Amino acid sequence: MSFTESNTVEAYVLDLLTNEVKAGLTNTAQEPQAGYGLGRKGIGWHFATPADIPRQPHELLVEPWLRDALIRLNPEIAARPDLADEVLYKLRAIVLSVRSDGLIRANEEMAAWMRGERSMPFGPNNAHVPVRLIDFDDLARNDFVLTRQFTFRAGPAERRADLVLLVNGLPLVLIEAKTPVKKCISWVDGALQVHEDYEKFVPELFVCNVFSVATEGKEFRYGSIGLPVKDWGPWNLDGGTDDARGQTHPLKSLRQSVESMLRPQVVLDILASFTLFATDKKKRRIKIICRYQQYEAANKIVERVLAGQPKKGLIWHFQGSGKSLLMVFAAQKLRMHPRLKNPTVLIVVDRIDLDTQITGTFTGADIPNLEKADSREKLQQLLAQDVRKIIITTIFKFGETPNGKAGALNERSNIIALVDEAHRTQEGDLGRKMREALPNAFLFGLTGTPINRADRNTFYAFGADEDEKGYLSRYGFEESIRDGATLRLHFEPRLVDLHIDKAAIDEAYKDLTGGLSDLDRDNLAKTAAKMAVLVKTPERIRRICEDIVQHYQSKVEPNGFKGQIVTFDRESCLLFKAELDKLLPAEATDIVMSVQPGDRKERPEYARYDRSRDEEERLLDRFRDPADPLKLIIVTAKLLTGFDAPILQAMYLDKPLRDHTLLQAICRVNRTYSEQKTHGLIVDYLGIFDDVAAALEFDDQSVKQVISNIQELKDKLPEAMQKCLAFFPGVDRSQQGYEGLIAAQQCLPNNDTRDAFASEYSVLARIWEALSPDPMLGQYETDYKWLSQIYQSVQPSSGHGKLIWHSLGAKTIELIHQNVHVDTIRDDLDTLVLDADLLEAVLSNPDPKKAKEIEIKLKRRLRKHQGNPKFKDLSERLDALKERFESGQINSVDFLKQLLQIAKETLQAERETPPEEDEDRGKAALTALFNEVKTPETPIIVERVVADIDEIVRLVRFPGWQGTQAGEREVKKALRKALFKYKLHADEELFEKAFSYIRQYY
């Protein structure tokens, strides 16, 4: 019997959820709890076959079940059951609205109904009463059903989901299970199917959706509607698998994720408390659901408050892993919890610039009952009046005691304070003052950097003795990198002869006591003044600026990223800017720094950088925009915390920083961005990382591994290269044309070997892209170029297996296309297939080499038409034919015959597909794409945008442009120009999608 997705992963997940798992996978992290709903066993889902579900394929809701639930959960409807039809009418209208209002709006409205936030005039005298579709308090009153092969039809489009979880007849979770037997097929293929196919063609299927899951048995990933696949996250609660994967049965880690996340109470908790609808910077509605670390920490905060003791807790979640949203989820759940009797939640930030980031997160997510207390008086007034809302304030308001005396602001016990960046208590003993001001409140400290025991203030204020290692919740950088929430960091020492000796750095650091206070201490102590002289010599600054430009233009800019320069003080910012202006256009760099009222007289040259908050935000939006000429931003103290710009990859460091301040600063470059961004880079001109252990001195030893020398990647390159070349023993790599390709491909005789090669090549390509251009790569260049061409030539033509078969990086493409003549490989497929004599000769004397040559030419043809359904079927037939031949199911003569048949049909399809049709398909794809991003605030004329792009691309393209660096560059430039006209140029995901369509169809 062969393994398929339905008899392995799909069946296994189904068994787990209905608790019929065969023996052999015991001792999971948690034993299944008693079931819910009408006497179930297992995790709580009851299996129903498609035939048992009373619905038609075009109906989303299982109306008989939903009607029963409405009667069961609403006394008013139980008294008059016909009222259920009025509710069903409303819900049907929401499903229909998806085509006019878009999927996010329809999902948001349906979520409000499912959460019980909508009412109907069913009470006495037509009074409005809330309508309940789901009982969140007593789960046993709901009906939890799991079904497989759930078919949904919308017009001509029909799709079948592998598994669907329904609560009271509402389809809340869709699960796409892929086969674990093929190495190249992964969860990515399942997620792409959900995001790019189902959501697009049958959006109705997702109107009730809380989240979707994709798995191939090894990895479990989930995402909400509209979330790009690269952002789908794992669910590693219940002690998810360690990195030592060898010790863990892959299906066991799937079991832990399924049994933790897909329990009925967790699915409903995510719907009720961990789902937000927000407006992003481009004024578009987006849906946000929690990551598992936010779910766990927020629930631990709520549990502790419900338990009443201890009255504090410390949460360390690594920089960049979503602390602002964690505070939103926790605040929302605390405010809504019935047992907490309407508490006051204080969000306490420790500085002005973080105020905007956190406040922005709360206001963007439309959180109701929000107040800002920007003075101690206002804070005192709100607390004295017993205002039961979410109050955002800064920690300094607790230090500003009137007439110098501290004292209680409010003695209530259902006040819960969430304090951001809790370790920063350098500004005096603010943690203790806060405790005095709110003697009976709960205080939870959140921090992105670990806390040292020596920092008694923080542990006194927030760390509870009951918690292991002092943390209520810990999500370290190892977990963050494993989950793909943040990227690895590498440092690269440059111009080592300019490094300042360690003793001088330590001295200067001690005197820069304010480390990262917003105001630079320009009147430093003597040792720092000595250091300033060393750091600011004109010759040193000139050499560093030249090196920055050379490094940025060769290593960072080719992949479309930007850089941040951190200088010694404000004067250095200006010295760097003056020097950089000699090397780059003036608009390529700018300075962001604090300017004080007194500076106008004493330092008039600072005045032009005195910006209001709005002006600064506009400048930073320009920096985040890939199309804007601003490439490098120069700072000294500002933007080293709380500044979020995923496009930022490189930090050029020339300022003495240590410990918390250093860790926070370097984490500006660890945000994920595009597939090309594999790591963040710190270029060290001062020698801070000459001793990593001293630079990052924390009790938690793991922090030493947060950053590693780029040299480590250089050391890994030879081994990675060897692993790839080992697939081709005895192959002459200097052989050109088909002979060379065929010899190499014969070493990859089947899918397993090809996929194993693709995995090794992916590792090598990542290292290469990170290091290029570096002189040490010279000796490996010929072999790397050869391997890249082989990798491209054996990619599956059907486009499956996106995890290891992906597009090449910018620097690799440039390398392959250096000195390549367009017709190195003659394409004579037409002559071969259409010349009867030649065909006869080939068939009467089958030569394996000739078959291979035809296959290579056919693959190349099919790749040109990727995305066209006519050719997709042919691609899949070719992949299936190869598989049958390689597994010995057919002989070489049959293989050749069927291969020629597919080649014939391909040529036939090409003749029937005029080039215009491909371009029309391109225009159709672009039209659909821009319709998706249209909002009431930006009602772009889609036809006009598409026509402009079409016209400008036709002007600059040339035959075979996709295969050259110059072609890609020109077309990208043209596309940015067209998008700029409609103010759409700042959306990187939109740009990438539009470019991929143009690549495919033009």
Image (spheres, rainbow, N blue to C red):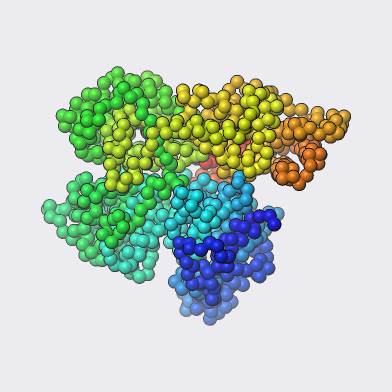
Horizontal arrangement in the rendering, residue 201 relative to residue 978 (left or right): right
Q: Nearer the viewer, residue 147 or 878?
A: 878
Looking at the image, is 523 positioned above or below residue 214?
above
Which of the 4 quarters of the picture holds residue 967? top right
Q: Nearer the viewer, residue 423 or 865?
A: 423
Looking at the image, is 676 positioned above or below residue 441?
above
Q: Quadrant of the C terminus?
A: top right
Q: How many labels sit on residues?
A: 0
Q: Residue at x 21, y 62 (%)?
A: 439
Return the residue found at the far bottom.
79
> Residue 213: image x %, image y %?
55, 55
> Residue 544: image x %, image y %?
34, 23
Looking at the image, is 80 positioned above or below residue 192?
below
Q: Residue at x 41, y 51 (%)?
A: 364
Q: Can residue 83 be seen here? A: no
Q: Quadrant of the N terminus?
A: bottom right
Q: Nearer the viewer, residue 690 or 565?
A: 690
Q: Can residue 445 be seen here? A: yes
> Residue 837: image x %, image y %?
87, 29
Q: Residue at x 79, y 32 (%)?
A: 847
Q: Residue at x 53, y 72 (%)?
A: 41
> Residue 126: image x %, image y %?
49, 75
